[in-house]
Image (cartoon, helix red, strand yellow):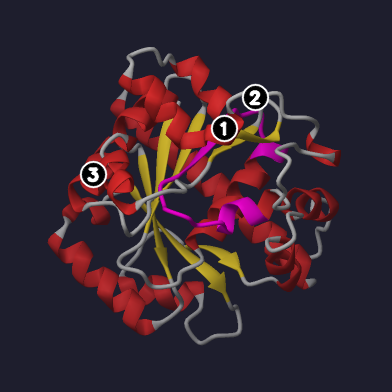
Amino acid sequence: MSVVTFWNSGKEQTGKTLSIAAISTYMAIEHNYRILVVSTGKDDKTLDRCFWQEKKVKKNLGLFGPNTHVAMEEGISGLIKIMRSNKLEAENITNYTKIVFKDRLEVLQTYKGGQEEYKNLCKMYPEIINLANNYYDLVLVDLDAEVDENTKKEIIDASNLVIVNLSQRLTSINRFMEIRDNQPMFATKKALLLIGRYDKFSKYTIKNISRYMGEKNKVSTIPYNTLFFEAAEEAKVPDLFLRLRKTVDEEDRNGFFIAEVGRTAENIIYRLQDLQMKMG
């Protein structure tokens, strides 16, 4: 049972949310984990669009099977109400999520409502994440830039692993190196670097970035892939991964994409196991 938080500095577009969608889908298909993705943003439909068509009738079709959660439409708001009445148990969190793969992958969706209520709600995310960690094998947190700094710190401090999401731009890399110099945690094994929307033809390759940053461990990537970005707009990400999972030719762009997502997922699992062994 581990908490993995996906973080980036500021509001730069690093492909963080789509990276979470890719990694969580891969893990749900290839590993026997029960995974919860917690979206801490406000009115952000990026993750929803990866998995569900926007419909007035709240139900899942086809691959995913029916969702029988009676409180599904309330999501995080319904969960908060139960928490405030001190009636929430860890195993009941699933009643407020949406299912991607039954018993494998669920999403606690982004908050949809007013700004003031969102600010108050943010302060409860650490408790929600901690409670979820008692029930799910992996809790993947999409840490939004709008979450207040104290809550961000509380979530990061309580995380087993922090995925630092960077873009393939020198300014992004230099900005993080400054942060790393001032915040020692980011220089430890608790932090794993991830380049989203990776272009292997850029001069800023994984090898060159790792050398430039003085990283001993290879930087992970989620490559840019046309089929994936189209699927992420059409609620077809799970279908895409199921279709491409047997593509093994890494010279093929789709084979390269699946291979890199797989390596990133395995790097996360390995790093968690390594950290747990050292703690033990």
Pinpoint residue 118: horizontal percent, then vertical percent: 33, 46
What span is colored magenta in the figure?
A: 28-49
- Place residue 276 in its image quadrant: top left
**Taking 66 as reference, is 194 left or right?**
left
**What crowding class fits label 2: few (fewer than 14 Cα within 10 Å), some (14-19), or many (20 or more)?**
some
Q: Sequence order check: which comes first, mark 2 or mark 3?
A: 2
Q: Label 2 amino acid?
A: His
Label 2: element kind: loop
Give 254 or 275, whichever is nearer the viewer.
254
Q: Label 3 amino acid?
A: Thr
Residue carrying label 3: 151
**What crowding class fits label 1: few (fewer than 14 Cα within 10 Å), some (14-19), or many (20 or more)?**
many
Give 168 or 37, whichever is nearer the viewer.
37
**Taking 246 as reference, is 107 left or right?**
left
Q: Sequence order check: which comes first, mark 2 or mark 1?
A: 2
Say the numbered circle drawn on residue 69. Answer: 2
Residue carrying label 1: 97
Front position among marks 2 and 3: 2
Pinpoint residue 249: horizontal percent, then vertical percent: 81, 64
Whether the residues at callouts 2 and 1 have beta carbons within 8 Å, the answer is yes
